[in-house]
Amino acid sequence: MRVNQELIDRDRRGFIQSVVTGSVGGSLMLMIPMSSSLGKELSSSSSEAKVNPINLDANYCFMVDVTGCIGCGNCCVADRKENNVPEGQYRTWVERYVIDIYNTVYVDAPDGGEKGYSEPRTDIEATIKEAFFVPKLCNMCEDPSCVQGCPISATFTTPDGFVIVDSDHCVACGYCVMACPYGVRFINEETKVADKCTWCYHRVRKGKLPACVQACPTGARKFGDLNDLESEVSKIYRSAERLEVLKPELGNEPTLYYINSREEVV
């Protein structure tokens, strides 16, 4: 099936608008083989655990408990080490939300929150009423606009629901970066191709937790299979009163859920 060249040459703004409105159709939504680089990583003989078969019966999800995050940055450090993320770029980061007595909201993420938040903000004159931290990462959407936005299908969804970038085919056009409504994609300064959080797909396929989940000292990050009724995420999903996704009105159907989220979080 050929890619519509007219779509590729179209002005970027118009192209992304067509993605958002859903007018870009099946000609761009191709399924392609797993990238050879990811395949090599999964099948490496030096791996600690054997790669498991793709579980088509699983319904994986990620959860973040906003009340549990302490802004320590351990998750960002673990992610950088696990996925060789270049300095100054982030697959996951932690935002600090500060609210003053006038309900003015200030949001920042110096160094992506990787170095923690030991120093308070000094640029806010009003009395601070409260503050909290919000981790951000790929929302692993069921209807991802980034997949629709890629003109050569270098971004695709695996059979078990993970949105992945095929680094061997990506041409770094940036369409997927612009199409993502959550701002989690970037052009990797070292590899020169599109990059993003994968929920450590290479670890999940070996029966491990994502690196950031394992590194979180408070258990604020959670990962698992919703179809496994005994899993922590499944129990939370069935009982949590405040379980939300970001920007639900866009129709991307994220599988990243926030526990005890706040209306200030965007």
Image (cartoon, rainbow, N blue to C red):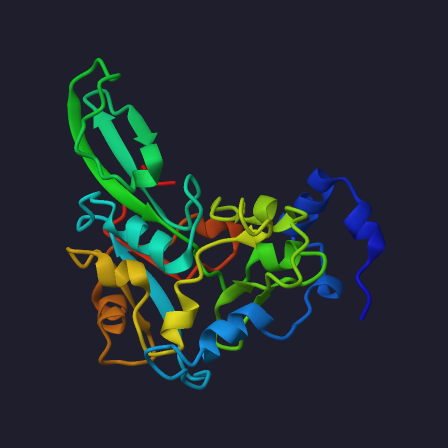
Outermost residue on the top side: it is: 125
Q: Measuring 47% from the left and 48% from the top, which residue is drawn there?
A: 184
Note whether 105 is above or below 124 in the view shown: below
Q: Say which quarter of the image contains residue 234.
A: bottom left
From the viewer's perspective, tell me whether residue 149 is left or right of residue 42.
right
Outermost residue on the front side: it is: 46
Does the rendering let one see residue 266? yes
Give the quarter of the figure containing the N terminus: bottom right
Q: Say which quarter of the image contains residue 27.
A: bottom right
So how many labels did they put on this image?
0
Where does residue 244 sit, x and y in percent of width and height? Answer: 33, 54
Does the rendering let one see residue 21? no
Note whether 56 is above or below 10 in the view shown: below
Q: Measuring 65% from the left and 72% from the top, which residue is drawn there?
A: 31
Of residue 260 and residue 16, the one placed in the foreground of this image is: 16
Outermost residue on the right side: it is: 6
Where does residue 128 sit, x and y in percent of width and height? Answer: 17, 23
From the viewer's perspective, tell me whether residue 68 is left or right of residue 107.
left
